[in-house]
Image (cartoon, rainbow, N blue to C red):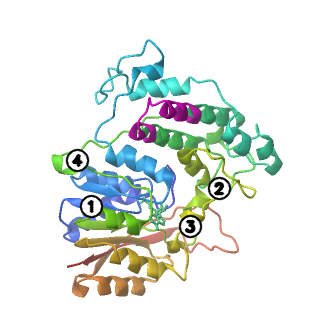
């Protein structure tokens, strides 16, 4: 999924950086997990990963990509009385029917006029009032049908929580591919973009198979990093990838978040873009006056031997302050950082409140050893 701060392209840099910095152990914590790209890569590298994030959309990715050790089988009752056997090309499927068959079943549902159609596509009276064009009427109807299908299966006990999250992750990704945005949901485009005119297509999200028994027992968590670190217990490395600027994630990803949470109870939407209530998701990391304290707090809650922090050079906390805070929190002499330049992710254009400083930007991986 297109997600600000997604580290997929930086994974080789991060894994090589860990080698260079001498980070060893078997248990890792990723409390700002977002799309779970880093947690997945660590798991595939043999780590047991405890992941977390405040966003429900992230929880779906954490379960789908990190917690699950194989693609689960599904109840045949999802396909009606006759059921179906696992697709032969789905070797990880076990029991009942396969993920692939369940996805086909969801895609074959007739379109529904639900919350997404009503509030985020021209099919809805509320959406028309605000001129919202996040999805075409066809795709919104398909998204509603799939979301309602998943919810009703879960309500009737046919899907457990992990299977539900696996399907939600597929829906969030599918919706993102046809969203009429430039990558974030803070605004929609006023004419239909080519991607938004393509039909919704669900693609299975494949769990990471643990390469060794040490990588089993990964966990997911929806909540603040400090709380997650308290629960995680003893870990060897904590990888911190917090927001680094003033863009609050719930305002930029309210629709995927809504898809993850569902709409019962019905949320009260606000503004032209139909934002959801998000007070409890607003992050101190995105507030100039509070981000340094947020870093100190998270460090206080972690007893990991190795601390890694990804932070962009244009972030709210100036580089010398990060160095100072990390040195204070552990063995001061062990502090190191490695950097990598990359092409910036442009979700918005330049404007009165944001001036991009060029196309290249540097990401730092800071390190300090503790205990
Ligand atoms: C830079 S993104 C992480 C990107 C992720 N590494 C990836 O590859 O997709 C920062 C994440 O921190 C989350 N976040 C913000 N404040 C948080 C907090 N106090 N506790 C936990 N997660 C938080 C946001 O929801 C967002 O998903």
Picture quadrant where residue 208 is located: top left
Give percent across and percent down for residue 156. Answer: 49, 30
Circle 1 or circle 2, nearest the eye: 2
- Is 175 left, or right, of 306 in this rendering? right
Give percent across and percent down for residue 157. Answer: 45, 31
Residue range corresponding to the magenta coloring: 147-165
Relative to 348, say whether 147 is above or below. Answer: above
Beta carbon of the mark 2 residue lies under 8 A of ligand 1: no
Residue drawn at x 44%, y 51% as measured from the top left:
59
Q: Which mark is residue 276?
A: 2
Nearer-N-terminus badge (2/4)? 4
In whole angstroms, how far apart are the C-alphas of marks 1 and 4?
Answer: 12 Å
- Is 325 left, or right, of 141 in this rendering? left
Relative to 93, say whether 32 is above or below. Answer: below
Nearer-N-terminus badge (1/4)? 1
Beta carbon of the mark 1 residue lies under 8 A of ligand 1: no
In whole angstroms, how far apart are the C-alphas of marks 2 and 4?
Answer: 36 Å
Residue drawn at x 50%, y 64% as measured from the top left:
344
Give percent across and percent down for residue 324. Answer: 36, 87
Nearer-N-terminus badge (3/4)? 4
Q: Pointer 4: residues within 10 angstroms few (<14), some, or many (20+)?
A: some
Q: Is residue 170 visible?
A: yes
In whole angstroms, how far apart are the C-alphas of marks 3 and 2?
Answer: 12 Å
Q: Which residue is under mark 1?
A: 28
Q: Which residue is under mark 3?
A: 282
In whole angstroms, how far apart are the C-alphas of marks 1 and 2?
Answer: 32 Å
Quick one: SS at disc 3?
Answer: loop
Q: Which residue is under mark 4?
A: 216
């Amino acid at each position: 999924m297109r997600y600000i701060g997604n580290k997929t392209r930086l994974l080789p840099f991060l894994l090589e950086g860990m080698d260079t910095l001498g980070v060893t152990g078997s248990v890792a914590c990723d409390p700002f997990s977002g799309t779970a790209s880093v947690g997945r890569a660590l798991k595939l590298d043999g780590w047991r990963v405890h992941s977390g994030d405040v966003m429900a959309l992230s929880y779906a990715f954490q379960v789908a990509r990190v917690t699950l050790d194989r693609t689960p089988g599904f109840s045949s009752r999802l396909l009606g009385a006759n059921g179906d056997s696992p697709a032969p090309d789905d070797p990880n499927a076990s029991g009942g029917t396969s993920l692939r068959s369940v996805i086909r079943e969801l895609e074959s549902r007739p379109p529904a006029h639900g919350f997404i159609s009503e509030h985020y596509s021209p099919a809805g009276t509320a959406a028309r009032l605000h001129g919202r064009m996040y999805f075409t009427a066809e795709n919104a109807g398909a998204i509603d049908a799939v979301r309602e299908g998943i919810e009703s299966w879960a309500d009737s006990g046919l899907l457990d929580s992990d299977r539900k999250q696996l399907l939600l992750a597929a829906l969030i990704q599918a919706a993102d591919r046809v969203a009429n945005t430039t990558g974030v949901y803070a605004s929609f485009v006023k004419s239909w973009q080519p991607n938004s005119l393509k039909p919704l297509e669900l693609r299975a999200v494949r769990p990471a198979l643990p390469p060794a028994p040490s990588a089993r027992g990964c966990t997911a968590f929806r909540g603040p990093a400090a709380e997650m670190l308290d629960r995680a217990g003893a870990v060897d490395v904590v990888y911190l990838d917090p927001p680094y600027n003033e863009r609050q994630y719930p305002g930029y990803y309210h629709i995927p978040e809504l898809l993850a949470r569902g709409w019962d109870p019905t949320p009260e939407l606000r503004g032209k873009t139909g934002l959801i209530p998000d007070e409890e998701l607003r992050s101190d990391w995105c507030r100039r006056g509070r981000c340094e304290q947020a870093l100190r707090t998270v460090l206080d809650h972690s007893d990991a031997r190795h601390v890694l922090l990804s932070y962009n050079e244009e972030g709210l906390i100036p580089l010398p302050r990060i160095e100072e805070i990390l040195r204070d929190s552990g063995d001061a002499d062990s502090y190191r950082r490695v950097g990598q330049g990359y092409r910036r992710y442009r979700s918005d254009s330049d404007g009165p409140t944001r001036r991009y400083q060029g196309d290249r930007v540097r990401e730092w991986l800071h390190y300090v050893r503790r205990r």
